[in-house]
Structures are given as structure tokens and as C-alpha cells.
Image: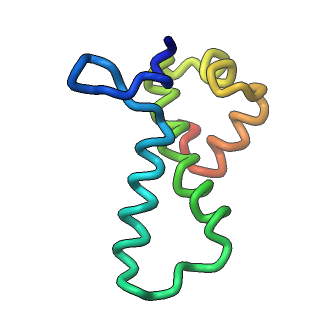
Amino acid sequence: MSSTERDDPSSGQTKPLRHYVGASLDQYFESLNGCEPPDNLYEMVLAEVEKPLLERVLDQTGGNQSRAAEMLGINRATLRKKLRRHALNG
């Protein structure tokens, strides 16, 4: 069983990433207090997730961009473009 398929942290297993994303979205919608969510929610979520994803993956790889790109499943040029966009290029 992969770490993304486990779901019981009390047993030493972690919940899948989608659990945490779902919980964050639930909290976001609750915080709106009846207000309309913003337009283009899909793009907003992607923009909010991309920078911390890049930061954490770079931390995990010790800053090695080739390994980070491989972990992310993108090529290194794409990673560098994303790092510049988020001012993470050192």
C-alpha cells in the first residue's frame, strides 16, 4: 500500500493528499459565511498550491532542481520557469 493510500494517522499511516486538500477547501467555503466564492476558483486553487508545492519539493531534494523536476514529473526548464514565476529561483 502506498503512502497516498493510507488513511489512519493514529496507526502510523498517513491520509491521502486529497484528504487535506478537501479539508482545506471545506474550511475555505465555511469561511466565506454565505458570500459568493470568487470566479475562476480552479485557477485560484492551482496558484495557491503551486508555490508551496515547489518549495517543499525543493526542500526534499536539497535544492537539486533536476531531482525536483523528476519528482514533480515535469522537465527542468518548466521547473525553472515556475521557480522564476514564484520568485523561488534563489
Front one among 26 and 61: 26
x, y (%) of residue 49? 53, 49
x, y (%) of residue 21? 47, 48
Q: How many marks?
A: 0
* Position above or below: 61 against 26: above
Q: Seen in the image, is 8 located left or right of residue 34?
A: left
Q: Which residue occupies the extreme bottom position in the image?
A: 35
x, y (%) of residue 85? 65, 51
Give the quarter of the image for residue 42: bottom right
Q: Which residue occupies the extreme top position in the image?
A: 1
Q: Seen in the image, is 33 located left or right of residue 2?
A: left
x, y (%) of residue 56? 46, 32
Q: Which residue occupies the extreme left position in the image?
A: 10
**Rendered residue at 49%/24% (across/down):** 4
* Position above or below: 43 against 14: below
Front one among 19 and 57: 19
**Rendered residue at 41%/44% (across/down):** 20
Front one among 88 and 10: 10
* Position above or below: 38 against 64: below
**Rendered residue at 57%/79% (across/down):** 38
**How are the colours assigned in the image?**
rainbow
* Position above or below: 12 against 51: above
**Rendered residue at 53%/47% (across/down):** 51
